[in-house]
Image (cartoon, rainbow, N blue to C red):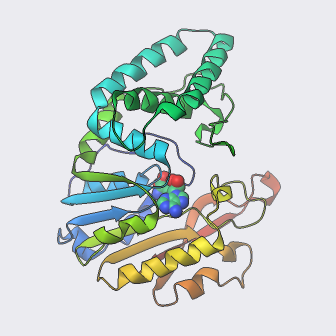
Amino acid sequence: MVTSPAKPFLKWAGGKTQLLDEVRKRIPLQVKEGEVPVFVEPFVGGGAVYFSLNGMFDFKTCHIFDINEELILAYTVVRDDVESLIHHLDEIAEEFLSRDAPVRKEYYYHMRNEFNQTKGDINFNRFGREWTKRAAQLMFLNRTCFNGLFRVNARGEFNVPYGRYKNPPILNATLLRADSDILRNTKIHHGDFTAAGPYISGSSFAYFDPPYRPLNQTSSFTGYAKDGFSDDEQRRLAQFFTKCDATGAKLMLSNSDPRNISPDDNFFDSLYSDYRIARVPAKRYINRDGTKRGKINEIIVTNY
Ligand SMILES: C[S@@+](CC[C@H](N)C(=O)[O-])C[C@H]1O[C@@H](n2cnc3c(N)ncnc32)[C@H](O)[C@@H]1O
């Protein structure tokens, strides 16, 4: 078993770095023994689990998917054009970091405008040189915006305000090269999770990390819940999980645990009643309001 320095190159809502130990504890034996050649992640997001597992185990091929086209563009550029990406980011970092605070803020909003205004010029279906500049802009905005998240408004514009970090780490060339290397055995797909179907078989291990089911109405840590991953979507996913199970694939899925708030809420327990459900401590909190903070569980479903 080799370990690799590869890890997420973007900060992403719902990042699983905190859950990695619990995921690793539950890796199927066949994966550890090198008997499973294909890894599939239908909701890759920042890729904490993907980078960790593809660095640890000897998968012949990985398939990663996400519905977010900017994210898929960035993964593709990191894999296929990393040196040029590093060059772009280096220029941006130098320009930004050499300026004083008020000018940095202006630079940020200028970049944000350009990013939004040029979206229409990008063909997200076909790699072109303009992809690399866009990936560099996305990474810069991700590192310098408030809370380091990617969020778009109803018109699809990136609308996060400036973050005022003192020395934001805009370029980490070593990390980007390590990620590029890890991505070499990986097919990167833009699409709905069901598009992963053809790649899930008795030779695969798949990890599903869908957008969390919000624990309460005002829950603030589901950055993309408003994009509509409703309970119906969770049900559609459970049906897909059952379909994948029938192929003989090894499957793991994580989500928030509704019982943190409502002890009688059996939503996932009934959706996944045919499978093993573990409740594991998560290092995140129910409320940002300090007085109501409490540790919570997440659920991990496995079919083995
Ligand atoms: C919880 S995040 C994944 C977090 C990731 N495992 C990590 O560690 O950063 C969920 C991801 O699902 C994506 N998503 C939402 N709806 C989707 C759909 N119908 N099909 C595929 N991906 C979807 C979102 O864009 C988001 O990146």
Where residue 236 sits in the image (x, y, percent)? Answer: 54, 76
Residue at coordinates 64% horizontally, 52% vertically from top-left? 223
In the image, taking residue 256 as reference, residue 293 lies left or right, namely right
Please identify the residue farthest to the bottom as the structure is shown: 274
Near-viewer residue (119 or 165): 119
Q: Farthest residue toward the right?
A: 291
Residue at 38% across, 29% down: 132
Q: Is residue 68 above or below residue 20?
A: above
Q: Quadrant of the N terminus?
A: bottom left
Q: Is residue 199 visible?
A: yes
- Give the image location of residue 19, x and y in percent: 48, 61
What's the residue at 22%, 59% (across, down)?
61
Q: Residue at 49% of width from left, 81% of height from top?
A: 239
Spot occupied by residue 44 in the image (x, y as percentages of width and height) = 43, 56
Give 296 or 46, whichever is nearer the viewer. 46
Name above or below for residue 62 compared with residue 102.
below
Residue 57 visible at all: no
Residue 301 is left or right of residue 55, and the answer is right
- Quadrant where the image shows the C terminus: bottom left
Q: Is residue 240 above or below residue 20?
A: below
User: Where residue 255 appears, x then y in whole percent?
Assistant: 55, 69
Which quadrant would residue 213 be assigned to in this image? Answer: bottom right
Q: Quadrant of residue 231?
A: bottom right
Number of residue marks: 0
